[in-house]
């Protein structure tokens, strides 16, 4: 028979897994006790002059967070492991094969930059236009490359350029394509991530348009979600979530003076929304 103390410890371990969290008007998916819990970080990790968080990348042992001017490596309790100053404007990032891939837009051009797990720059690929939004699926790197047809990216538009590159060589794998998910947006792709089967692109909302577009490897639209997630969205590694499809989302926090004060991280499970999140 189990002792009373053993039963109490078992109940104590089970209680966190039963909690449901409410964040920014959205019901957050409950997660198993072994999965990282929602947490927040402050200016110990962020550059006060670096603007809002641009993207996040989830690795099995760390979460990488990018601002325009800094990358921070965190453990899954939100403790800072390392930070690195990076060129402005560093945008979205993704984790693949032990390396961190980032999208840098600078002086009207772009660079795919690749860092190791200690945030040492190991290679980069210059491009002929600004970029943002980056993910790798089946060895192909998908890259947001701004508005199509020479449209000013800051003005509402529908067509955005999506590039495809080989992740190992960074050479282009296919002609650049136009992606139109049927709604107006500004600034093109903000983030791109993948659940291992399909891709999720996040956009700024224009006139209430959905902010997440889900599409396949052939760029065919499958569905959209009304989830505010343009400051960072990434799928958690499957080994952390028992094979589930679960995403971590970043939301910048500001003080009463309007300045960056921190960033909160919560979870989203597609199809489990119980409220509009825009």
Image: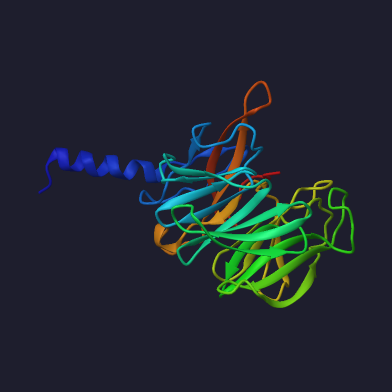
Query: Hey, which quadrant is residue 199 in on the image?
Result: bottom right
- The percent coordinates of residue 49 (x first, y second) are 64, 33
Query: Hey, which quadrant is residue 48 in on the image?
Result: top right
Query: Which residue is situated farthest in the bottom direction here?
Result: 174
| Front one among 220 and 255 | 255
Q: Name above or below for residue 73 compared with residue 200.
A: above
Q: Name above or below for residue 173 compared with residue 47.
A: below
Residue 190 in view (yes/no):
no
Residue 129 in view (yes/no):
yes
Question: Which residue occupies 66% across, 27% down?
Answer: 259
Question: Which residue occupies 71% across, 44% down?
Answer: 278
| Front one among 131 and 249 | 131
- The percent coordinates of residue 171 (x first, y second) are 65, 74
93 displayed left or right of 88: left
| Front one among 278 and 157 | 157
Question: Which residue occupies 42% across, 58% down?
Answer: 241
Question: Which residue occupies 85% across, 59% down?
Answer: 158
Q: Name above or below for residue 258 compared with residue 153.
A: above
Please count the marks in the image: 0
| Front one among 39 and 271 | 39
């Amino acid at each position: 028979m189990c002792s009373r103390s053993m039963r109490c410890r078992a109940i104590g371990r089970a209680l966190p897994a039963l909690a449901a969290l409410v964040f920014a008007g959205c019901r957050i998916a409950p997660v198993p006790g072994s999965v990282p819990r929602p947490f927040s970080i402050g200016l110990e990790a962020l550059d006060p002059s670096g603007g809002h968080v641009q993207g996040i990348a989830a690795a099995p042992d760390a979460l990488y967070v990018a601002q325009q001017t800094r990358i921070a490596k965190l453990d899954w309790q939100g403790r800072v492991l390392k930070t690195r100053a990076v060129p402005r404007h560093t945008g979205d990032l993704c984790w693949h094969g032990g390396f961190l891939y980032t999208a840098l837009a600078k002086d009207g051009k772009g660079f795919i930059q690749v860092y190791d797990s200690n945030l040492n720059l190991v290679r980069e690929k210059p491009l002929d236009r600004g970029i943002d939004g980056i993910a790798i699926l089946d060895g192909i790197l998908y890259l947001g490359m701004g508005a199509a047809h020479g449209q000013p990216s800051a003005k509402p538009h529908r067509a955005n350029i999506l590039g495809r590159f080989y992740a190992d060589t960074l050479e282009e794998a296919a002609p650049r394509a136009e992606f139109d998910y049927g709604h107006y947006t500004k600034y093109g792709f903000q983030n791109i991530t993948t659940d291992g089967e399909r891709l999720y692109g996040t956009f700024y909302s224009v006139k209430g348009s959905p902010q997440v577009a889900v599409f396949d490897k052939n760029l065919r639209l499958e569905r959209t979600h009304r989830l505010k997630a343009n400051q960072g969205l990434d799928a958690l590694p499957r080994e952390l979530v028992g094979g589930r499809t679960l995403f971590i989302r970043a939301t910048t926090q500001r003080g009463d003076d309007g300045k960056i004060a921190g960033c909160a991280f919560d979870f989203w499970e597609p199809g489990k929304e119980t409220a509009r999140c825009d």
